[in-house]
Amino acid sequence: MSARLTPILILSFLSLLQPAQMVKHENFKTCSQSGFCKRNRALADRAQSAGASWTAPYELDGKTLQLKDGVLTGKIWKTEAGGIELPLEVSLFENGVARVTIDEAQRRTGEITLRHDSKARKERYDGAEKWALVGDHKCQKTATMETKEGVTTVAYGPDNYEARITHKPFSVQFLKGGEVYIVFNDRNLINVEHWRPKIEKAEGEEPTEDEETYWEETFGGNTDSKPRGPESVALDITFPGYDHVYGIPEHATSLSLKETRGGEGNYNEPYRLYNSDVFEYETDSPMTLYGSIPFMQAQKKGSTVGVFWLSAAETWVDVIKTKQNPHALTTEKASTQTHWISESGLLDVFVLLGPDAAWVYRQYGELTGFTTLPAMFSIAYHQCRWNYVSQDDVKDVDRKFDKFDIPYDVIWLDIEHTDGKRYFTWDPLTFSKPESMQKTLARRDRKLVAIVDPHIKNDENYAVDKEMVAKGFGVKDKGGEKVYEGWCWPGSSHWVDCFNPAAVDWWKSLFKFDKFIGSTPNLWIWNDMNEPSVFNGPETTMPKDNIHHGNWEHRDVHNINGMSFHNATYEGLKIRLGSGKERRPFVLTRSFFAGSQRSAAMWTGDNQADWPHLQQAFPMLLANGIAGFPFAGADVGGFFGNPSKELLTRWYQAGAFYPFFRGHAHIDAKRREPYLAGEPYVSIIRDAIRLRYSLLPAWYTAFHQASREGMPILRPHFVMFPDDEAGFAIDDQFFLGGTGLLAKPIVKESATKTTVYFPDDQVYYDYFDHTTYHRKGHHEVSAALEEIPLFMRGGHIIPRKDRPRRSSGLMKYDPYTLVIAVSSEGTADGVLYVDDGETYAHQSGAYIHRAFTFSYGDNTLRSGNLHPEPAKAAAYNKDMRSVRVERIVIVGIGKEWAAKKVVEVKQGSKTWKAKIVYTEGKDGKANTAVVRDPKVSITKDWSVNFT
Ligand SMILES: *[C@@H]1O[C@H](CO)[C@@H](O)[C@H](O)[C@H]1NC(C)=O
């Protein structure tokens, strides 16, 4: 869920007669309808037409510069209005990240007056870091500074980094080994709109074009009172020689971002980041969506760099690429120029110089936190619809999955399960026995997810609302005293203010079992509508002049609102079992920000049951993954509308490769649980879901790696092959973690084949039939409805569990299959991470971490321990000791393997023999061999010798 059904919308049901559903563009601002965006774009246009004569009125005062313990401070003067003082801080972190922060002295000291007797804070918002950043970032005490002829050079490690700061006009180049990688204010578009009093115009006097949008702004019948006047910050950031940029989700666009200032195939609007409930969003668009992560990466051959723009306010980003002159004699590459524009707050940017994607992700993770290791069930299959109408309906669906032998782990309840849209309650007629329903599910180790949204029904007989209002825990209207009232699912509603620590503590308490009556430890939570969605608000959200805790305006914190809420939910779920008994919470959120990866999974909101939306999902999930939030999925089947059986089937095949894998449907959509599809569809969907379950060990290992190092779960080509420019724009195929699995699920109608791109000359094997590909480049492969193009890159060992079960919990002690995809060089290796999948015991060492290596040299497969403190795993190993490897499949071997009948197995001081069966590959397929039941334990060091 969800989308709005306002009275206006109901009136417009007539429009449903039109074939395609369309986003209501008129409900959302374009750049020119957003005053600060329009002003900054106009400034860019003026700079463009002025050419070389253009300069920015920003000068760094060299005399004020000080470098102390890795932090450079100084003053920038904006040489307008008698001189505006802008404090500058450049922090050089030990891990190589540089941070540039610009504030405004007069607002900081509060020497300004607000209009309309506003109670809002006067400073520029500086609280985003409290939400987005984790850990303490030590600065490099060894950084040095030198000033020559108006340029200050700061040298900092770890890799001969330099920040070269030109004083007049202020600009910064970031260099590594003498080469420029990133430039701030290359085009002189820097702009910090300083505070000014409103000067009333004399009668007949017209405001200038800029002034028109300095003060009150009206859009769609809502007026923003803007008590602080204009206060935007903007900066241009250039990536010289980089012709691809990625990231800044969430947009329904390609992974490699398009240009935004017109021209063939480009957008005319900047990418917008302003978390919104965009009803019936369209594909291939820079429009804003539900979440935002202002983190961008630039890629050129052999180099990845990143910038993280820390602002929680409405933000727009223009992207243009300088064209290469085809007649030029130089080999200079195209460059990418970006222009970042935020409505309020500090100008605060982090620079990550790579050298490669893995470093950038690690550095970004050290800033904002790595994705939390999810519970195992939460990466299995989820079944949802708006709505399962009763507990009997839930039990019926549960039974049908079993009847049709389709595994699933979680069934979901949307808003209709509540008593009149009052969260934390159950409909007394349809869900009279929620605990017994959860017990039924628990029999097969299945879970329930129920929805809890941030809008609280305005009803004094509803204890949650009564308490929230009485304690002052709701968001306030612009007066700063009265709780804000707006419309959402329950009708008139109030919104919990999770920027208030006391409100968070209260919210957390609502999940206790004696408060949320009918909940059990198997119930987890879905946070929807947390942008927040307000049906009668401007752009379907809250007025920007609403007041949050600490008197910050909503405008300052808008993009963090969703995260503040799902974080509070997560913390509440974590503590409800009591200290020492915590289980890893599962929370799904629609709205998100940088840092959301620490406490939630996300999905791409209300997509549609059509092919373009199926196609759009992978680029979106890839973008989320490289922006540090890989636990992401799209509604399988499409939320609005009714998918054809072919579309539904293809969507399950794609969904089996979404890190978050959930089927979902709108209340008006026909029932479409996978067992209803009829043959051959049911069988094909069953196979796709079983494929996901069999690869759960590989998925979980990839999540573990993401949680430690920040590497995405779905890895685009540019991450895996940073020298292969032909792969930089590919976003319809990707690698699964470090497994070497390359997937290209079909997202086009009536396909029977597709073209797959292999990025190197390594051997690739078809996952299912072991057809072999040896050459880098494009290859046509068959892709009939029952086929998923999936390949194993030679050189990898993939862990699986092949016994079909009803849920992932029932697979806990199942034996493993290891698939060795032998490289052209005759080697392979792989990693497996295992823990109990639900508690925090892994944090004290209760896990298995194995490295498998195979080489033709000595014809031996080995299992070695990666656990740094094996003693801490002793108790867990004991629990797992009977879990064995039941099968080893070796793909891509020579004919001489035909002679082998037995292999020698060694574990500890014991050796024994196991059978091996060879199969010759025909018609371009690889030769394979299978070792049956080598009887080795997953917890132990062992070797299998094939000679
Ligand atoms: C949630 O937010 C609080 C601050 O309110 C913070 O202390 C906590 O670490 C956050 N939790 C996560 C999982 O990020």
Image: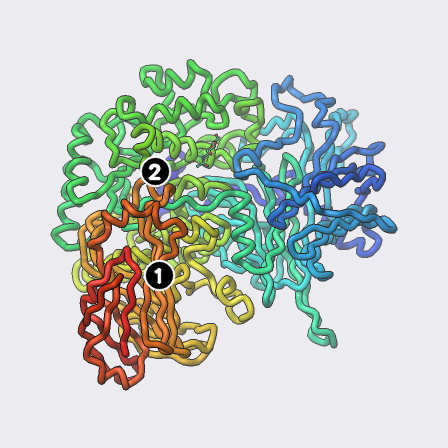
Numbered tag placed on residue 585 in the rendering: 2
| Mark 2 CB near ligand 1 (8 Å cut) | no
Q: What element carries label 2?
A: loop
Q: How far apart are marks 2 and 1 (CA)?
A: 31 Å
Disc 1 CB within 8 Å of nearest ligand 1 atom: no
Q: What residue type is labelled 1?
A: Gly
SS class, disc 1: strand
Which x, y percent locates residue 242?
Answer: 63, 62
* The C terminus: image quadrant: bottom left
Residue identified by numbered label 1? 864
- Dot 1 surroundings within 10 Å: few (below 14), some, or many (20 or more)? some
Q: Is residue 236 left or right of residue 370?
A: right
- In the displayed structure, does residue 554 sit left or right of residue 467? right
Query: Can you name the residue that lies furthest to the front here?
Result: 909
Left or right for 491, reference 103: left
Provide residue 889's location: percent of width, then percent of height: 26, 71
Q: How is the image coloured?
A: rainbow
Quadrant that contains the N terminus: top left
**Above/below status of 168 relative to 85:** below
Please state the horizontal and vertical placement of residue 121, each as a whole percent of the image: 63, 23
Q: Is residue 634 above or below residue 530?
A: below
